[in-house]
Image (cartoon, grey):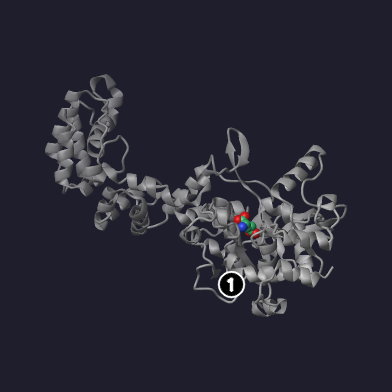
Amino acid sequence: MDLKKLAARLIPDENLPSLEDCEKAYPPRKLKQGAEVTRLAPSPTGFIHLGNLYSALADERTAHTTDGIFYLRIEDTDEKRKVDGAVESVIRSLKYFGVNFDEGAEIDGENAYGPYYQRRRAPIYRAFAKDLIERGLAYPCFCTEEELDEIRKIQTEKKEVTGYYGAYAVWRDKSEEEIYAALDAGKPFVIRLRSQGDVNIKHTFRDAIKGSITVTENNQDVVILKSDGIPTYHFAHAIDDHFMRTTLVIRGEEWLSSLPIHIELFKVLGFELPRYGHTCSLMKVDGGTKRKLSKRKDPELSLDFYRAAGYYPQAVIKYLMTILNSNFEEWVAKNPDKDYKQFPFSVSKMGKSGALFDLDKLNDVSRDELSKITPDEMFEFLAAWVAEFGTDADRAHFNDREYIVKILALIMGAGQKKRRKDIVRAEQGVRLLDYFFDDTFAPQYTFRADGETVKVMLEGFAKLYDEADDNSAWFAKLKQAAAAAGFAAENAEYKANPQAYKGNVTDAAEIVRIAITGSPNSPDLCTVMGILGKERSLARLTAAIN
Ligand code: GLU
């Protein structure tokens, strides 16, 4: 068969680049020895998840700890799954977490290794597919979906491996007449690889994460160009990672089963195989058993969840680092003031199977991280969340920076030896500010004392309250009002004779606390009243009497 003629009929495109042109257009990168080129290659489906961030962080750390390059490639070959704005969402989400690309889609235009959208690289894929056809290493297949279903059915019944291979590869050895007849009849076709592999041959493969694994040769005549002329993931991956000069492909372990196909594709294309690292899936404990995080069941799989809930990006990254490299925590303990970027990250130390993701642990890391920042930094962090996700009332409150910073200094225990760790994330932190504003003050007046006692206590304290009092003068007055309302002013007195009192001074303070803050738990009450100001404080004491 005249394969050149067949290739020209199957891929008639004019102006395809020559294979040499491609090599020249994408020369090996001039990087120092050992520099790694990594990439994130998401499909623009609009769903960017924790697994993507986990991989991206491994990619970014690998590239940037070796003076290499980390780039973004958009795998948009599946038009049906494409969602508008998905690329911007990937970039924005990763930027939120401080994971930045050096080059790639939408970044500083397109540089020498682009375009970074696969659909825009069609001529390159087609040129290489054409070459494979000319070399007898690829061929057209005219099978309909129904015919393929039928093959699958037979294979399943016979308990054989499913797919298009061996005797099931019906178009692999069709005659010239049959092929041209199908073409003349205008039948749609795909281009398949003519696999040279043998499933009886196994090789040892060194995965950068999983270590030594056994790989069986591929014998599937996989589709390389779909009927619309667009490449499959397999084919595009081999060509792009070659020409974008990726040195290490870090991707999910769900691709491990396709590795034999990729090894064969690199071979027939004449490209050097990059190194691969297959990341393990993120798991969670659910009802005592471990399972994969699921898009349907676990909102925490979506990266949007972390932005909307106002997670401190650095905390998420630090937590992911602890999952990525088990020696990270120990390093942090030894280097508490160093940036995580100084940690000597290594793909070879990544978990080989099932990384456990635990929201409670993330919350702990988040509390810790947020307890290290200043009230001003906290203001910036919360204000950014409020601008995007807060209510109108939140936005109005955040116009008064001075007032909020004062509250934050109190809530965070700024200046104290042991900082408070009340703020876990922005969504929850902003709610801690609510009672400092009248429009969001929603008190629950559930006093433990009777109405008359509450009245006497609050009226008595209101009369004595002086904004100018320091903490001890304030407390002395509280005790005075407590005693007048029938509480023991001193704990020792109460302990000696509890029957004689309505409670101790803490019980009396609780009445004031509920009146002022709306709940029995709050930071230092004297300071809270100072921040609220005399007028508002007295109004609250009065409002609580009923
Ligand atoms: N587009 C593939 C995915 O989103 C990328 C796999 C890879 O990184 O090579 O799963």
- Decide if ligand 1 comes within 8 Å of the CB at mark 1: no
Q: Is residue 472 visible?
A: no
- Helix, strand, or loop for circle 1? loop
Q: Quadrant of residue 177?
A: bottom right
The foreground one among 189 and 410 is 189
The foreground one among 459 and 483 is 459
The quadrant of the rendered image in which ligand 1 is seen is bottom right
Outermost residue toward the left in this view: 463
Q: Quadrant of residue 18?
A: bottom right
> Above or below — where is 74 with respect to 80?
below
Outermost residue toward the top in this view: 499
- Is residue 522 shown left or right of residue 2? left
Outermost residue toward the right in this view: 200
Q: Judge the density around disc 1: few (<14), some (14-19), many (≥20) Cα neighbours within 10 Å.
A: many
> Tag count in the figure?
1
Q: Which residue is mark 1?
A: 114
Q: Residue at x 53, y 73 (%)?
A: 110
The foreground one among 157 and 60 is 157
The foreground one among 21 and 257 is 21
Q: Quadrant of the C terminus?
A: top left
Q: Is residue 324 visible?
A: yes
Residue 125's spot in the image, x, y percent?
67, 68
